[in-house]
Image: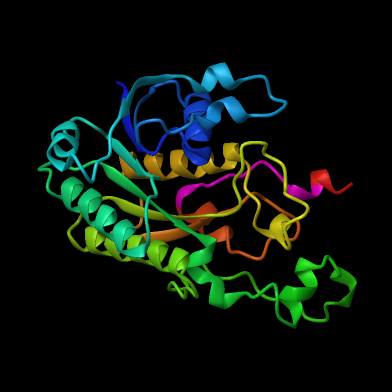
Amino acid sequence: MAFNTLLIGGRGTIGSGLRLYLPEMDERYRFCSIDLPGAPDRAGCRGGEGRADRADRADRIIDMNIVEEPERFRAMLPGFDLVVYLARQGDLAAMNRMTDLVFESVLGLDHGPLIVGSSSVHAVDDAYRFFESGAYALIAERRFDAIRNWPAPISAHLPACPINDYGREKAYVETWVERAADQGRGALAVRWGGVNTGNTPIVEERGYFAVWCHQQDAAAMVHAAYSAHRNGTLPPGRHYFVISDNTYNIFDIQTPREEIGYLPRHNAETFYR
């Protein structure tokens, strides 16, 4: 039995990683990717691994602006077991309209797939402020010995607390996930950390090592969620942080470990030795 998977924005950084790593976790994944016409395929940007060809495993790659062709988009949805919503376009209002379209369309199906909606650690930006004073600023500066009281991990149950429009668009996705769960549908919001095609922490970016996520670990979260959904054990309406197993992680990844078996493999500190 194939796991028919729709990636909305599958040519991007996260989507290309899912196309590469999900089949390594279970060979039954089969992909259809919808992307804006002309969108670059980030699978070709994977530095050093020499495995970009393996990310070119989508059964179909379709050029489509779903906002401009909503009926064509809706007609495609039946038959998918898993929908991962990754796409972005426009300003906050445009993003929220696209999110409305995606969730309304998926929830309109009689037998809906699991829908994984992209959120971000930036949905909770007000919970940690790397550019201010205190423990989080010291963490961002890698002044670990100066921290007297290490902050507790930011809870996976913390409601969204964004401080800008990017965070607000992600918080809006989370509200839709909660609405889907209220309707008895399988839905999960994934609060992506710092994912990039090179799979290395960006050392120039303040605090990046604390939020970094390898593409393989991003795929591990989606696989764990879909496996739990298939087994009937996925908790309803959750939003999980998708972060690698970093030594100086500031987010709660223990909750998804316990609830759905998320097992990240990578650690940003590998690149700081």
**In which quadrant will I find the N terminus?**
top left
User: Which secondary structure class fits the magenta region best?
Assistant: loop
Q: Position of residue 192 (x, y in %)?
A: 52, 53
* Of 197 and 251, the residue lying toward us: 197
Q: Position of residue 22 (x, y in %)?
A: 48, 30
Write the residue at 23% across / 58% down. Answer: 180
Write the residue at 55% across / 77% down. Answer: 126
Write the residue at 47% across / 73% down. Answer: 162
- Horizontal arrangement in the rendering, residue 183 relative to residue 127 (left or right): left
Q: Position of residue 21 (x, y in %)?
A: 53, 29
Q: How is the image coloured?
A: rainbow
Tell me if residue 234 comes above or below residue 45 in the rendering.
Answer: below
Write the residue at 61% across / 52% down. Answer: 194
Tell me if residue 163 comes above or below residue 238 in the rendering.
Answer: below
Q: Which residues are magenta?
A: 260-269
Q: Position of residue 157 (x, y in %)?
A: 46, 70
